[in-house]
């Protein structure tokens, strides 16, 4: 979806420039790595696919950049897993929100 925003005389667009075949390739690679490592590298696969998505996104003429690392996510993943066990699964309802917050925290403008 492309939007146009007028700021003075400068027209700035928001768009996504990734392709379907790239998404399929990165997703299949993530599934393959996750399967081979029995889920241990799932945080790496998430970072890889999310990084591809965010690095191909431009908002109001400014490209986004993903700065997160699999090591950083893995530490949070362990913490979230333990919290889910300790709370008998209740924290699992907040897990997707915690992941989105982590993604947002590690997303910046490239320039």
Image: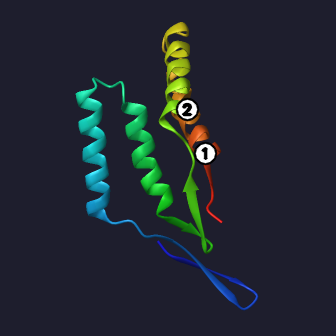
| Scheme of colours in the image | rainbow
The reply, left or right, for residue 39 in relation to residue 101 is left
- Where is residue 109 drawn, in percent x and y? 64, 60
- Where is residue 58 drawn, in percent x and y? 55, 68
Determine whether 100 is above or below 65 in the image: above
Residue ID at (56%, 28%): 94
Q: Residues within 10 Å of mark 2 (few under 14, many from 20)?
A: few
Residue ID at (50%, 71%): 15
Labels 1 & 2 near each other (Cβ < 8 A): yes
Q: Which residue is mark 1?
A: 106
The Cα–Cα distance between marks 1 and 2, rounded to whole angstroms, is 10 Å
Q: Residues within 10 Å of mark 1 (few under 14, many from 20)?
A: some
- Where is residue 32 drawn, in percent x and y? 23, 37
Judged from this view, the residue extending furthest toward the right is 8
The reply, left or right, for residue 81 in relation to residue 104 is left
Q: Which disc, if any, is residue 72?
A: 2
Judged from this view, the residue extending furthest toward the bottom is 9
Residue ID at (26%, 54%): 24
Between 1 and 25, the residue placed more toward the observer is 25
- Quadrant of the rendered image containing residue 41: top left
The reply, left or right, for residue 46 in relation to residue 100 is left
Q: Which disc, if any, is residue 33?
A: none
Residue ID at (57%, 61%): 64
Secondary structure category for the residue under label 2: helix
């Amino acid at each position: 979806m492309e939007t146009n925003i007028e700021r003075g005389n400068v027209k700035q667009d928001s768009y996504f420039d990734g392709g379907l075949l790239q998404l399929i390739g990165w997703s299949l690679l993530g599934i393959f790595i996750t399967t081979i490592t029995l889920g241990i590298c799932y945080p790496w696969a998430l970072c890889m696919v999310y990084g591809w998505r965010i690095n191909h996104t431009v908002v109001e003429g400014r490209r986004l950049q993903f700065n997160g690392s699999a090591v950083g996510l893995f530490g949070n993943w362990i913490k979230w897993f333990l919290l889910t066990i300790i709370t008998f699964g209740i924290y699992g309802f907040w897990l997707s929100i915690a992941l989105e917050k982590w993604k947002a925290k590690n997303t910046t403008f490239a320039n």
